[in-house]
Image (cartoon, rainbow, N blue to C red):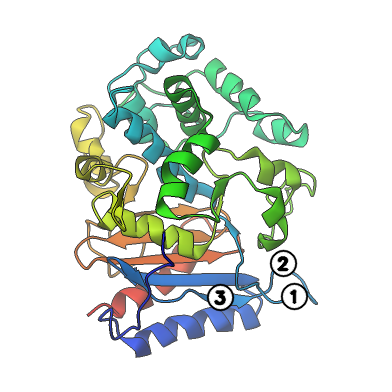
């Protein structure tokens, strides 16, 4: 795979003055210690501006500058990538969105979960909670991913499948196990072989690669996280959780965006069908009869991707259209793609995200204003 195709703002029909404003905001935030570091990559269709990186490799005084080859813990931007693996297996006839999870993983049927379908896991309509109740204890004890899957299988859903929407990371732990059962490969291996290597995403991995450890920009961790199990710990970086463990560079994530805009292909390499791309980026809540109307209309979900929520506090910004899709990450990351303009934005920071995401959405507004 050749290097990331790049161009100037003028060549991508983006306003350079507006983009400089976005750069200035990030620089100001770094100088005032609002964020330790950030990387911004903006692109259009099959080309991108060279990523701009500012800040330090880790929080705190005296830290070295952010490396030009820095990698970031993407947190929940991992979810649409895990969903991508599931949809690839749907394309191959090995899974179906309407499959009952319990038919594939019998242990999952416990406590009233027998009617949850794969579609419900991908759209946050399963009734499962975001995290298992003993999430922190499992992390403090350095438990393997299988322990999180086993705890999820014990849970009782909060509502009938499809009757409501509740954001759930636990469902993506189960999706990873479904990929394992259907493909015979663990999710990190599947993604490396089927997505990252074909797309030239050579710096991407679900869970760290030991030789790249020094390149990972450290996150300013919340006080409740322990040094031995928090985001920056070898345990967490190595666990590769399917809801939040992806480590990547901004350039690699740009390749993923270009593939989505390419209808599933990049540089002559196809990893996904155009039909699958449409399904992933279409409002899937409209297909679930019991889902409340306000969720379908105002807070739609695709398959793993979150569609834009205009007018909602946690939207991707104030200036993007309803076809925009993307995802946030708790480590301070944001990625969105606007099909109307063909523009995508990747913003990776090391400052944990506040509850509604409006902090990073300010940069989204400036970038959106640069679209001609």
In the image, which disc is placed on residue 53? 3
**What SS does tag 3 mark?**
strand
Q: Residues within 10 Å of mark 1 (few under 14, many from 20)?
A: few
**What SS does tag 1 mark?**
loop
* Earlier-in-chain disc, 3 versus 2: 3
* Earlier-in-chain disc, 1 versus 3: 3
**What SS does tag 2 mark?**
loop
Q: Nearer the viewer, mark 1 or mark 2?
A: 1
Instruction: Judge left or right: residue 12 versus residue 243.
Output: left
Report if the CB atoms under discs 1 and 2 are less than 8 Å apart: yes
Q: Which residue is mark 1?
A: 64
Instruction: Judge left or right: residue 352 versus residue 197.
Output: right
Q: Residues within 10 Å of mark 2 (few under 14, many from 20)?
A: many
Residue at 33 percent across and 23 percent down: it is 95
Q: Nearer the viewer, residue 159 or 241?
A: 241
Q: Which residue is mark 2?
A: 58
Q: Residues within 10 Å of mark 3 (few under 14, many from 20)?
A: many
Q: Nearer the viewer, residue 358 or 204?
A: 204
Q: Position of residue 128 (x, y in %)?
A: 46, 27
Residue 312 visible (yes or no): no
In the image, which disc is placed on residue 338? none
Q: Position of residue 340 (x, y in %)?
A: 19, 64
User: Residue furthest toward the bottom?
Assistant: 17
Q: Taking 318 as reference, is 236 above or below it? A: above
Report if the CB atoms under discs 3 and 2 are less than 8 Å apart: no
* Earlier-in-chain disc, 1 versus 2: 2
Residue at 41 percent across and 14 percent down: it is 104
């Amino acid at each position: 795979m050749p290097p990331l195709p790049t161009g100037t703002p003028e060549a991508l029909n983006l306003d350079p003055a507006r983009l400089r404003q976005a750069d200035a905001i990030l620089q100001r935030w770094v100088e005032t210690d609002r964020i330790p570091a950030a990387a911004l990559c903006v692109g259009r269709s099959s080309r991108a501006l060279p990523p701009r990186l500012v800040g330090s490799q880790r929080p705190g005084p005296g830290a070295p500058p952010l490396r030009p080859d820095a990698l970031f813990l993407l947190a929940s931007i991992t979810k649409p990538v895990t969903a991508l693996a599931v949809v690839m297996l749907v394309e191959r006839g090995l899974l179906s969105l309407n499959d009952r999870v319990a038919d594939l993983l019998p242990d999952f049927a416990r406590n009233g979960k027998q009617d949850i379908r794969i579609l419900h896991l991908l759209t946050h309509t399963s009734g499962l909670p975001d995290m298992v109740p003993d999430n922190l204890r499992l992390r403090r004890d350095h438990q393997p991913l299988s322990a999180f899957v086993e705890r999820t299988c014990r849970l009782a859903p909060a509502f009938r499948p499809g009757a409501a929407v509740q954001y759930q990371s636990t469902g993506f732990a189960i999706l990873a196990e479904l990929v394992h059962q259907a493909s015979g490969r663990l999710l990190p291996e599947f993604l490396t072989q089927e997505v990252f290597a074909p797309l030239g995403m050579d710096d991407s991995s679900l869970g760290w690669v030991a030789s790249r450890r020094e390149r990972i920009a450290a996150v300013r961790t919340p006080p409740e996280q322990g040094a031995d199990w928090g985001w920056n710990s070898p345990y967490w970086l190595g666990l590769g959780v399917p809801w939040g463990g992806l480590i990547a560079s901004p350039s690699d994530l740009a390749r993923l965006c270009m593939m989505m805009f390419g209808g599933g292909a990049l540089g002559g390499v196809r990893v996904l069908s155009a039909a699958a791309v449409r399904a992933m980026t279409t409002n899937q809540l409209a297909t679930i009869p019991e889902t409340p109307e306000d969720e379908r209309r105002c807070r739609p979900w695709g398959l793993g991707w979150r569609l834009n929520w205009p007018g909602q506090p946690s939207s991707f910004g104030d200036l993007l259209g309803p076809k925009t899709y993307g995802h946030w990450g708790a480590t301070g990351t944001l990625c969105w793609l606007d099909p109307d303009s063909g523009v995508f934005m990747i913003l990776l920071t090391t400052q944990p995200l506040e509850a509604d995401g409006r902090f990073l959405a300010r940069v989204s507004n400036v970038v959106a204003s640069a679209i001609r």
